[in-house]
Image (cartoon, coloured by chain):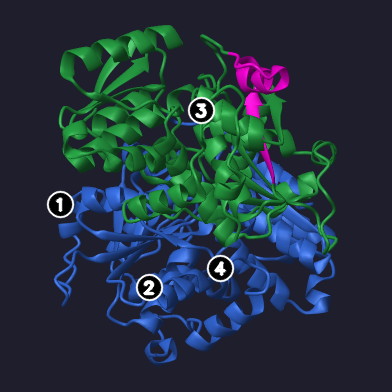
Chain colours: A blue, B green
Amino acid sequence: MNLIMSTAPQVESSNFQAPTWQDIVEAHARIAPRIHRTPVLTSHSLDAMAGAQFFFKCENFQKTGSFKIRGAANAILSLTGAEAAHGIVTPSSGNHGAAVACAAAWRGVPAYIVMPKNAPKVKCRAVESYGGKITFSEPTITSRQENSARIQADTGATLIHPYDNDRIITGQATAAKEFLEEIPDLDAVITPVSGGGLLSGTCLAAKGLRPSIHVFGGEPSRADDAYRSLTTGTLQSIDSSDTIADGLRASLAPRTFAILRQHLDRVVLVTEEEIITAMRLVWERMKIIIEPSSAVAIAPLLKPSAIAALHLPARSDGAPPKFGVVFSGGNVDFSSLPF
Amino acid sequence: MNLIMSTAPQVESSNFQAPTWQDIVEAHARIAPRIHRTPVLTSHSLDAMAGAQFFFKCENFQKTGSFKIRGAANAILSLTGAEAAHGIVTPSSGNHGAAVACAAAWRGVPAYIVMPKNAPKVKCRAVESYGGKITFSEPTITSRQENSARIQADTGATLIHPYDNDRIITGQATAAKEFLEEIPDLDAVITPVSGGGLLSGTCLAAKGLRPSIHVFGGEPSRADDAYRSLTTGTLQSIDSSDTIADGLRASLAPRTFAILRQHLDRVVLVTEEEIITAMRLVWERMKIIIEPSSAVAIAPLLKPSAIAALHLPARSDGAPPKFGVVFSGGNVDFSSLPF
């Protein structure tokens, strides 16, 4: 096993030091008793369509309905008693908020969740079901940050950033750690990318366990800041976005950008139509509920030409490439489906 | 292990002899290489809601999207070459039709499927995707039977009744056989009931493996022929029905009625609203796609008073009752959801 520690990224003009493999191992030990080890599913019909061997890590079956509980649990269970005492505040488009509310309830402290007012109702109800207190903001990063800062000042709560936080990143990394432990010879792994917590954690864990693996991010064209950041080499942002992938409306942060620059192979963009088609296809063929953000991970891979364009090395067994796809969540508002 | 053979039902004024345990074992051996051994899932939130321990046999993940492939494969793979040569004809509201088309394709013979013209489009597309040839009939049993008879006369195809057929029944029985093999101490098992192939097969397999088990059928109030047949002791029929559970619009047949009279503990009726609520609940909490007919099996069990009303004996371990629920299929027309 290779240690990420030996290939820690050196980011220009920054003292940033990426989390180590040991950090991921400790995060996994910390959260494993609380979370599900989610199943890995396959689909003959999707394999046949793309000419690939797909393996789907089903974080839609995870506690709170998404991978976000991994990072939130790791961050909140790591806090000292004094840090946790006045509660947690965080901005979130939904799944991270539910995860923070759930993990804060495990600690017995309040959770203040700042959500954009256009967040799906099902995600608001989820936050409330775990006892989280919601403040609605405008659907812009600026408005969310202002509201979070105000609550922090008023309550003394500890701010947990949804992804620009090492313990969030190492928590999210545990999904790829489980994935590679179960399917060790994956040629590539792909996750959706928004703020980059899941994708940067996936880079650290996947390349830590298997240095030759390729890691890709799927991103909506309508929220393409990660693509632009990695293409230009300068952190780009979007201040608002109307993609149907409601979990992917955030922009990279310094920590996640640094890790992706070091380790990520490529961001692949998808249209809204491709997201909807992929989501419906998974529902119909696999009979599982994935949310639009999850569909962004499989949408770029559904035809042989798309697989070929990724230029993966041929497998020694001559078989089609083995692709690990992380289905990030399954929280869908059934009253406003796109089909 | 107890053999069903030793408790074969003696039906009054009939020469009917129910299939034996050995028939079920042979059916399972015949079809196991072709079908999925579907997973059994659990849900903490549904358990907490009802005060029960639920286990869900996920035939929505089965090949062709429903349990129907079990019976169809068993029946069609059992035919002689001469019997199969001119193809298969069958009336079906959808899932049985897709299963027959799939199993006929395995045999390399044509499949003629007579479907009601109000069948969901997704089920028509599924039949066609396996190469089945559809004839549309009026949505009545009479019209379907007339069309089937005409095709049989025109083509020389062999009629395979969707449930009044021992090999269909023993094929469907293999789902409960797998279920009890995986969770041997179930106190009860429930399936939806329409023509009764799945439920009668479940009676034979479940009581064959565990004579003390209780077997229940869930049935829409709007298609309550099984409830009325078992209450009156005389085979009742519905000639058409508009329940949202589009897979449950058929009536019991002599074979299935005889088995249910002998072995079934009770039919529990559910309203359309209860079906829709249960379906949505499973989608939201379990993140899996079940069709309305599947929801009919869990809909009657979602509160403690409903569980209590079934008067199951207390478990020796003091735990809540262990309920096996068969999710029969997952073929849903997403363009006409009831929520």
Compared with A166, A131 (above or below) is above
- Of A61 and B137, nearer the camera is B137
Q: Which residue is mark 2?
A: A183
Are callouts 3 and 1 both on one chain?
Answer: no
From mark 1 to mark 2, how far is it between C-alphas? 24 Å
Disc on the earlier residue, 1 or 2 = 2
Disc on the earlier residue, 4 or 1 = 4
The percent coordinates of residue B307 (x first, y second) are: 80, 41
In this picture, which residue range is highlighted in magenta? B214-236
Q: Pointer 3 indicates a residue of which chain?
A: B
The percent coordinates of residue B266 (x first, y second) are: 71, 32
From mark 4 to mark 1, how far is it between C-alphas? 33 Å
From mark 4 to mark 2, how far is it between C-alphas? 14 Å
Element under label 3?
loop
Nearer the observer, disc 4 or disc 1? 4
Q: Judge left or right: residue A321 versus residue B299.
A: left
Q: Which mark is residue A37?
A: 4
Q: Which residue is mark 1?
A: A305
